[in-house]
Image: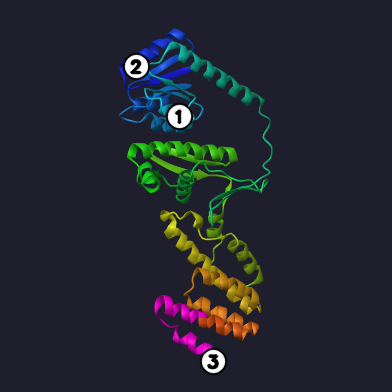
């Protein structure tokens, strides 16, 4: 097995090299006092194991671990630290093991034994893997109302986020899917009150948990890291937001077939975009999507009224008025639905409530055109 060593303290680097040479199980193909030079080595040549110091000034070892994972996920990382509290964080970042300074030959031998067992087990699994079966399930990510994963073969399957911050980081990456986001930007959104070093450590740990969850679900979704930036990419996973945007239509409904097609699109809108999570950075997009939903729904309601289905139109319009209670257009269509149903008591009550709402909240009266029409109907 090939290994490289990265530690900014030269005496510690030489000490670890002597121990490994004495043990004889690894071939040392490079040793560096700079994390960036070590990463350049890995870009040129694969290593099976990287011994990586956590506390380096130029680049934190946990951050360097992200780069290494991005280059080759099969590379095993053994973190080295003088501070035991980093040991837990090392495991959170999927370290193969960790070593506390000063490294002893006995502890190093145990680490190498663990690595040999893991590599042998992994090779055995690869050799016995069955032929891939045909895909029989569809995985989906839902963003309307709340963030959820869906498995078509297990409708009741529940997802468990490690923390609310992990959920928010994933939601932010999904919100900007395909686009690179600066690490500092993510930290500013999610951990605005944390000290920079602690916030970055939390981010690395959080990304590890996100990747672990995606793997457990079998999601073909990748969280990539490069040049201080993250991005999310996906394949073979449905996203209700994308389906809604692709099916959105701002024109009038002309046929029953068109109405049915739009119903399928509108049914994706279970609630406002990420409504239950209250992320400030999602607010602009939430409002844009809500406006699209209302506009498209109004065209469907107009078609229902023109095709003599006032009850169906009324049920739809009551939902829309809850989203946009001051809209003259929605109010007019609601009143028209009551009139077509012959329910003039409901007609009057609804208009009286609408007038009261405008006066109480906005200090205005309804538009004179709608007011004149109402008086004429009554």
Provide the residue designation for mark 1.
88
Residue 358 on the magenta segment: yes
| Location of residue 7 (image quadrant) | top left
Provide the residue designation for mark 2.
12
Of residues 136 and 200, the one drawn nearer to the viewer in this rendering: 200
Left or right? Give the position of 255 relative to 16.
right
Q: Secondary structure at mark 1?
A: helix
Residue lying at 44% horizontally and 43% vertically, measured from the top left: 231
Q: Is residue 6 above or below residue 366?
A: above
Q: Residues within 10 Å of mark 2 (few under 14, many from 20)?
A: some
Separation (CA) of disc 2 from disc 1: 22 Å
Mark seen at residue 76:
none
Location of the C terminus (image quadrant): bottom right
Whichever of callouts 2 and 1 sits on the residue coming sooner in the sequence is: 2
Left or right? Give the position of 48 relative to 64.
right
Q: Secondary structure at mark 3?
A: helix
Left or right? Give the position of 338 relative to 44.
right
Q: Is residue 109 above or below residue 33?
A: above
Which secondary structure class fits the magenta region best? Answer: helix
Provide the residue designation for mark 3.
376
């Amino acid at each position: 097995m090939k290994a490289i060593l990265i530690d900014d303290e030269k005496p510690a680097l030489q000490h670890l090299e002597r121990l490994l040479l004495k043990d004889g199980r690894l071939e040392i193909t490079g040793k560096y006092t700079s994390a960036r030079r070590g990463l350049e080595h890995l870009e040129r040549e694969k290593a099976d194991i990287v011994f990586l110091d956590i506390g380096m000034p130029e680049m934190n070892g946990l951050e360097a671990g992200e780069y290494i994972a991005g280059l080759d996920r099969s590379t095993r990382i053994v973190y080295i630290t003088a501070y035991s509290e980093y040991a837990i964080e090392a495991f959170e970042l999927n370290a193969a093991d960790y070593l506390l300074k000063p490294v002893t030959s006995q502890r190093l031998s145990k680490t190498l034994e663990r690595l040999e067992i893991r590599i042998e087990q992994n090779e055995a699994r690869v050799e016995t893997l069955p032929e891939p079966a045909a895909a029989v399930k569809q995985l989906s990510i839902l963003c309307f109302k709340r963030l959820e994963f869906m498995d078509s073969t297990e409708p009741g399957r529940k997802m468990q986020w490690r923390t609310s911050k992990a959920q928010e980081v994933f939601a932010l990456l999904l919100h900007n899917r395909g686009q690179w986001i600066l690490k500092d930007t993510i930290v500013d959104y999610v951990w605005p009150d944390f000290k920079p070093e602690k916030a970055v450590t939390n981010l690395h740990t959080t990304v590890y948990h996100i990747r672990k969850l995606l793997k457990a679900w079998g999601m073909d979704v990748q969280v990539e890291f490069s040049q201080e930036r993250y991005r999310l990419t996906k394949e073979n996973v449905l996203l209700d937001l994308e389906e809604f945007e692709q099916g959105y239509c701002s024109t009038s409904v002309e046929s029953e077939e068109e109405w049915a097609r739009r119903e399928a699109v509108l049914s994706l809108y279970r609630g406002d975009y990420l409504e239950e999570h209250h992320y400030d950075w999602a607010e602009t997009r939430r409002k844009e999507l809500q406006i699209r939903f209302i506009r498209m729904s109004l065209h469907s309601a107009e078609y229902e009224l023109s095709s003599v289905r006032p009850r169906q139109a009324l049920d739809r319009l009551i939902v829309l008025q809850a989203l946009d209670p001051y809209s003259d257009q929605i109010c007019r269509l609601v009143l028209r639905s009551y009139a077509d149903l012959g329910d003039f008591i409901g007609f009057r009550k609804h208009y009286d409530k609408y007038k009261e709402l405008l006066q109480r909240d906005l200090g205005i009266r309804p538009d004179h055109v709608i007011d004149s029409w109402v008086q004429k109907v009554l």
